[in-house]
Image (tube, grey):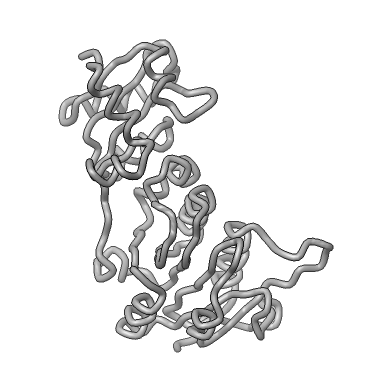
Amino acid sequence: MPVAPKRIIKEIRSLRHKKFRQEKQAYFAEGIAIVLSALENQAPVQYVIYSPELLRSETAYEAISEARARIPCYETSAQAFMSISGRDNPVGIGAVVGYHDISPDSPSLLAYSRFVALDNVKNPGNLGTVIRTADCFGFGVLICGESTDQYHPECIRACMGALYTVPVARFDTAGNLRQWCHKHGVSIVTTSSKARDDITQISGYPRPLAVLLGSEATGLSHDVLQLGELQVRIPIYGASTSLNLAVAAGIIMYDVVSKPEFKS
């Protein structure tokens, strides 16, 4: 197995920064479950890098053995791998993956009837958790405005491989998202702690639909909130006044799938 040259180590380090990710149109995905998901789902993996001193998974070695027939696989020392890792206790495997953006009109996205949409969401960990939760509940993901980079290392880590199984499409603005929803007959459900309807009082949701949430700090602006044909809030019974964004998204996604649907 070839040893990773210094240029590979240098390249992976550079991918921590959005500027270089955009220049190279690639990012570093680290961890056994994440790399296996990328390989299994035919993501555009450019190469795999691993450290025999750190990697202890037979399943991972089997995947490397199968992958090396079609993509480069490099060995590196534990010290070198730890220098590129974003984890406190790296397991010793990662992959550089090319960007895999999809068009909002992609058939893989339009096959869905449920979407979770995020406007101006800044926290990459929250975004990754929402993508992972969307995978669990069968939602496509729509991102708009000045939202964080879905290829940010924290987002990749929080996705746990769901970025390779869930379609994620981006829109420049919430207005563009609204136009897309109108074009494809998708109802918009907006969320706010000040919304009219409590989800416990709602008997069902339209299909297809997009549930739109704003940033944890500011929520949806007044104008964006008004895009919702239905505006909903999650009841809070304790002293806290708000929920973590990813938790709120998970609650609403579960509420949608657990209640009857009706055509918009």
The C terminus is located in which quarter?
Answer: bottom left
93 on left or right of 225:
left
Asked if residue 116 shows in the view, the reply is no
**Residue that protrudes farthest toward the left in the picture:** 70
> Which residue sits at x=52%, y=85%?
226
Foreground pick, 174 / 205: 174
**Residue that protrudes farthest toward the right in the picture:** 239
203 on left or right of 44:
right
> Which residue sits at x=19%, y=25%?
72
The N terminus is located in which quarter?
Answer: top left
Asked if residue 102 shows in the view, the reply is yes
Q: Where does residue 193 sit, x and y in percent of width and height?
A: 67, 74
Q: Where does residue 75 sit, x and y in percent of width and height?
A: 29, 16
Task: Relative to 19, say whether 118 is above or below.
Answer: below
Q: Where does residue 250 sit, x and y in percent of width and height?
A: 58, 61
Q: Where does residue 206 sit, x and y in percent of width and height?
A: 49, 83
Task: Relative to 56, say whether 48 is above or below.
Answer: below
> Which residue sits at x=45%, y=62%?
138
**Quadrant of res 107:** bottom left
212 on left or right of 27:
right
Foreground pick, 75 / 123: 123
**Quadrant of res 214:** bottom right
Foreground pick, 141 / 153: 153
> Which residue sits at x=34%, y=59%?
167
